[in-house]
Amino acid sequence: AHRNTIYLPATAAPIYLLALVCFRTSRLGEAGTEHGSSPRHTDLNLDEPMNNITTTLGQTAELHCRVSGNPPPTVRWLKNDAPVVQEPRRISFRATNYGSRLRIRNLDTTDTGYFQCVATNGKKTVSTTGVLFVKFGTS
């Protein structure tokens, strides 16, 4: 009986207080965010995962890397884990207001692969991968 009346409240109280402290810390963090310190100030966000594309020979494919952050991220494009090499008038990528866009014109079946964009802002890195599948046939 002595153990139940003394030790049970003594062990339950620290657990309750720990949970309360964690909850209050979390709530304060959210309140700080609401009052002007935006999470984007020191963060990098993947705003949307990359879509998979299935298309046919000769068509044009556009892959979009939708990322945002502060400082603004730089984006690298990879195909099957190797850097994408731009080809004049056929393969190009450029920065956009939403991140980056990779465009491949006059598609060939050899363009099929896993495409990944890797965005970094010096503080954090995010990436997303999509599959481009180029099939024989007409659109």
Image (cartoon, grey):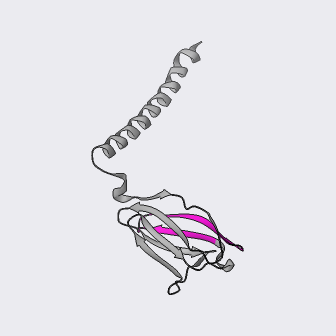
The magenta region covers 114-139
Magenta stretch mostly in which secondary structure?
strand
Q: Position of residue 94 (x, y in %)?
A: 44, 75
Q: Would you place residue 39 above or below residue 95 in this image? A: above
Q: Quick one: 23 or 35, which is closer to the camera?
A: 35
Q: Position of residue 43 (x, y in %)?
A: 40, 58
> Residue at left 60%, top 12%?
1
The residue positioned farthest toward the right in the image shown: 136
Q: Position of residue 9 (x, y in %)?
A: 51, 20
Q: Would you place residue 35 above or below residue 96 in this image? A: above
Q: Is residue 122 magenta?
A: yes
Q: Quick one: 113 or 22, which is closer to the camera?
A: 113
The residue positioned farthest toward the bottom in the image shown: 88
Give the total number of marks visible in the rendering: 0
Where residue 67 sits, quadrant-wise, is bottom left
Q: Quadrant of the C terminus?
A: bottom right
Name the side, left or right, on which 35 lies relative to 21. left
The residue positioned farthest toward the left in the image shown: 36
> Residue at left 65%, top 79%?
108
Q: Quick one: 125 or 72, which is closer to the camera?
A: 72
> Residue at left 49%, top 74%?
76
The residue positioned farthest toward the front in the image shown: 138
Q: Quick one: 36 or 104, which is closer to the camera?
A: 104
Q: Position of residue 78 (x, y in %)?
A: 57, 75
Where residue 136 sits, quadrant-wise, is bottom right
> Residue at left 47%, top 33%?
19
Q: Is residue 51 magenta?
A: no
Name the side, left or right, on which 123 lies relative to 139. left
